[in-house]
């Protein structure tokens, strides 16, 4: 009985995005970033995170991402200034802060 429960529980979580789609979104994000000299990098990240979450199903529930590029851009400026003020020390926390921001804006569709 327990084995069947575990199998059913884990079978409901999966990712249904395709490799070509991912490559396409990343190329678009790269082009946007290059042509705007990095200013639109937060927009490219949000675009890719949105695609990834739309194709992620956890426990049978599809995820969605509600973060915006302007929100991330504001945090980007704050994190950049904190890194300068702390002589680069805050930079060690940037990946954690970005992950926290992403998770904060990731939800399930009921």
Image (cartoon, rainbow, N blue to C red):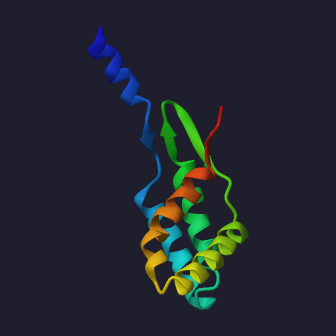
Would you identify the image quadrant in which residue 14 lies?
top left
| Residue 22 vertical placement versus 42 (above, below) | above
Decide if residue 40 is on the left or right side of residue 8: right
Residue found at the very far front of the displayed protein: 86
Q: Residue at x 48, y 31 (%)?
A: 59
For the point 54% across and 87% down, the residue is 84
Query: Residue at horizontal 62%, vertical 43%?
Result: 107
Q: Is residue 4 left or right of residue 60?
A: left
Q: Residue furthest right?
A: 70
Nearer-the-camera pick, 34 or 72: 72
Quadrant including the C terminus = top right
**Residue 16 drawn at (x, y percent):** 46, 46
Q: Residue at x 70, y 67 (%)?
A: 71
The furthest residue to the left = 3
User: Measured along the vertical axis of the image, is residue 75 above or below residue 84?
Assistant: above
Q: Is residue 77 left or right of residue 23?
A: right
The quarter of the displayed image where residue 2 is located: top left
Residue 45, given in percent of the width and then of the height, sits at 56, 69
Image coordinates for residue 56, horizontal then vertical, percent: 50, 45
The answer to whether residue 103 is above or below residue 38 is above
Image quarter (top left, top right, bottom left or bottom right) of the N terminus: top left
- Counting labels gives 0
Residue in the foreground of this view, choosing between 2 and 27: 2
Q: Residue 65: x percent and y percent?
A: 63, 52
């Amino acid at each position: 009985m327990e084995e069947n429960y575990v199998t059913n529980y884990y079978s409901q979580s999966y990712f249904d995005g395709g490799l070509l789609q991912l490559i396409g979104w990343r190329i678009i994000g790269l082009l946007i970033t290059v042509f705007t000299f990095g200013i639109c990098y937060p927009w490219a990240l949000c675009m890719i995170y949105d695609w990834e979450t739309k194709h992620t199903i956890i426990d049978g529930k599809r995820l969605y991402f509600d973060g915006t590029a302007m929100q991330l851009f504001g945090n980007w400026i704050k994190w950049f200034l904190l890194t300068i003020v702390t002589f680069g020390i805050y930079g060690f926390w940037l990946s954690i802060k970005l992950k926290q921001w992403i998770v904060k804006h990731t939800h399930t569709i009921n």
